[in-house]
Image: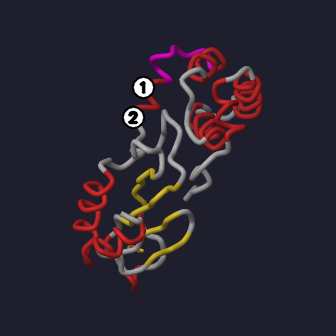
């Protein structure tokens, strides 16, 4: 489970739009293109680097792998974990696995989406929170579990959730 893309600095945000993008994507292509089925690892590497997959990286990846842009776009849009915009300052993971679901996880999910005004994969309009699903945080005995910026929270009900996000 990767959680390193919670937030990125201004330097990387600038890099995602600036001339350094081609260099960074070129380095990733160079490193990974010889793998069997290189597109997914390359997309993961680009997202790990920038926190999302910048639109300008798509033609570079397509050219580097001799694919069409539509093929690269198709893969990005097929997998919900690929992000096409920068993440919020804080990433909030809600556990969707069995134990948490049995202890009110579905109610918590619905509340979180309503309170933040976003669905999974979305970022609040103020850029503060990104909401992501996760499947088991290893905290099943204290369900439902939430991870906020790397810190685990147990037995989170809607009220506790509101306190967590300060709303
Ligand atoms: S099922 Fe949610 S922490 Fe394990």
Q: Which residue is mark 2?
A: 78
Does the magenta run of residues contain 69?
Answer: yes
Task: Name the residue located 31 percent from the left edge and 60 percent from the top edge.
Answer: 112
What percent of the width, then of the height, locates residue 54? 57, 28
> Looking at this view, is 9 or 155 the one in front?
9
What percent of the width, then of the height, locates residue 12? 69, 37
- Binning the other alpha carbons within 10 Å of mark 2 as few (below 14), some (14 to 19) or many (20 upward) gives few
The image quarter containing residue 13 is top right
> Looking at this view, is 1 or 152 the one in front?
152
What percent of the width, then of the height, locates residue 110? 24, 60
- Assign ligand 1 to one image quadrant: bottom left
Above-or-below relation of 123 to 77:
below
- Horizontal placement of 123 versus 43: left or right? left
Cα separation, mark 1 vs mark 2, equals: 6 Å
Q: Which residue is mark 1?
A: 74
- Horizontal placement of 39 versus 113: left or right? right
Above-or-below relation of 116 to 51:
below
Question: Which quadrant is home to the N terminus?
Answer: bottom right
Task: Name the residue located 36 percent from the left edge and 81 percent from the top edge.
Answer: 155
**Coloring basis for residues:** secondary structure
Magenta: predominant secondary structure element? helix
Numbered disc 2: secondary structure: helix
Numbered disc 1: secondary structure: helix
* Total numbered labels placed on residues in the image: 2
Above-or-below relation of 91 to 39:
below
Task: Name the residue located 74 percent from the left edge and 29 percent from the top edge.
Answer: 24
The image quarter containing residue 103 is bottom left
- Report the span colored magenta: 65-72
Question: Which quadrant is home to the C terminus?
Answer: bottom left
Does the magenta run of residues contain 11?
Answer: no
Residue extending farthest to the bottom is: 141
């Amino acid at each position: 489970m990767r959680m390193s893309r919670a937030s990125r600095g201004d330097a990387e945000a600038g890099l995602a739009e600036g001339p350094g993008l081609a260099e960074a994507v070129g380095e990733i292509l160079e490193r990974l293109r010889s793998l069997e089925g290189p597109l997914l690892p390359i997309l993961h590497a680009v997202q790990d680097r920038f926190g999302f997959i910048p639109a300008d990286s798509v033609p570079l990846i397509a050219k580097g792998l001799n694919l069409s842009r539509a093929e690269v776009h198709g893969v990005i849009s097929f997998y919900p974990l690929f992000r096409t915009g920068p993440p919020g300052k804080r990433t909030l993971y809600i556990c969707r696995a069995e134990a948490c679901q049995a202890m009110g996880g579905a109610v918590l999910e619905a509340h979180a989406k309503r309170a933040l005004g976003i669905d999974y994969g979305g970022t609040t309009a103020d850029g503060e929170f990104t909401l992501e699903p996760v499947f088991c945080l290893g905290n099943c005995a204290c369900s439902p579990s939430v991870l906020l910026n790397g810190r685990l929270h147990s037995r989170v009900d809607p009220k506790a959730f509101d306190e967590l996000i300060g709303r």
